[in-house]
């Protein structure tokens, strides 16, 4: 009997594209409004066929961002850091130094994938990346993101995701906690989840640098989404 394809194999069939995707790593800290402006411009250019797809890796100065489902009561310390409203899905999240944010601008029209498959692909990308450091990341049906078990029934979130699709092109993306200040998450209810915590690779005891994380992200992106230059 032929075994049923795994979710990962199904995503490989749905999401891969033969066209190279640009891969760019920003130096220093990128102000969030600048990132929004560039994403808007890049997504429009990709939709119009004027630019190749792009994955853009950044770090931001500390701030809280509000997705389209953000609830005012989940912003616990509005005076702590700047708060930016975004057009992505999801609720409140934190961005700051030590967190790798990957903005993923892909033309889903060319990939034969619906948005649900794309989100599953982003989750798989993060899970595969964590596996490079012997960390087991897991999905949860009742909450978005990638989670790790800490023992005693405790689970912590190590990566978040939130996207928007316009004219068939995705933007926004994922955030992987490499070594951010986890205390900064206390100013919000991250993604509306109160009964679980937040962790990072370094918090889990992995001496991972941002460069290490970037190499793992790049290595794990290509089997799922296609080649890079």
Image (cartoon, rainbow, N blue to C red):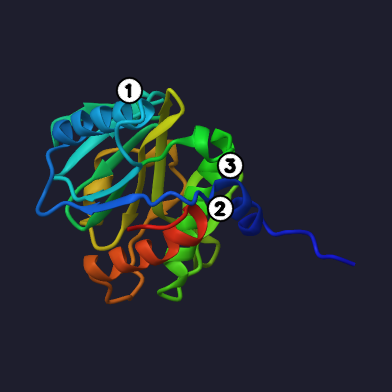
User: Is residue 134 toward the left or the right of residue 76 in the image?
Assistant: right
Residue, disc 2: 139
Most extreme residue toward the left is 28
Residue, disc 3: 117
Q: Which label number is shown at residue 136?
A: none
Label 3 residue SS: helix
Residue, disc 1: 72
Spatial CA span between label 1 and label 3 = 30 Å
Q: Are marks 2 and 1 in contact (CB under 8 Å)?
A: no
- At which x and y percent is residue 166? 41, 24
Q: Earlier in the sequence, mark 2 or mark 1?
A: 1
- Which quadrant of the view contains residue 79? top left
Spatial CA span between label 2 and label 3 = 14 Å
Discs 2/1, front: 2
Quadrant position of the N terminus in the picture: bottom right
> Measuring 47% from the left and 49% from the top, which residue is drawn there?
122
Label 2 residue SS: strand
Q: Earlier in the sequence, mark 1 or mark 3?
A: 1
Label 2 environment density (alpha carbons within 10 Å; few <14, some 14–19, many ≥20): some
């Amino acid at each position: 009997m032929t075994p049923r394809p795994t979710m990962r194999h199904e995503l490989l069939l749905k999401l891969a594209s033969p066209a190279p995707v640009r891969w760019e790593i920003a130096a220093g800290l990128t102000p969030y409004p600048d990132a929004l402006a560039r994403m808007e411009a890049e997504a429009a250019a990709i939709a119009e066929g004027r630019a190749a797809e792009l994955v853009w890796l950044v770090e931001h100065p500390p701030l809280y961002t509000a997705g389209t489902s953000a609830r005012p009561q989940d912003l616990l310390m509005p005076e702590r850091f700047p708060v930016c409203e975004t057009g992505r899905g999801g609720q409140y999240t934190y961005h700051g130094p030590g967190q790798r944010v990957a903005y993923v601008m892909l033309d889903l029209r060319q990939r034969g994938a619906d948005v649900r498959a794309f989100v599953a692909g982003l989750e798989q990308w993060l899970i595969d990346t964590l596996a490079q450091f012997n960390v087991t990341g897991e999905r949860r049906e009742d909450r978005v993101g990638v989670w790790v078990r800490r023992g005693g029934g405790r689970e912590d979130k190590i990566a978040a995701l939130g996207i928007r699709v316009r004219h068939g092109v995705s933007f926004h993306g994922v955030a992987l906690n490499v070594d951010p200040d986890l205390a900064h998450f206390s100013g919000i209810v991250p993604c509306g989840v109160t009964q679980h915590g937040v962790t990072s690779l370094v918090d889990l005891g992995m001496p991972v640098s941002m460069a290490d994380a970037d190499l793992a992200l790049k290595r794990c992106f290509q089997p799922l989404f296609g080649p890079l230059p």
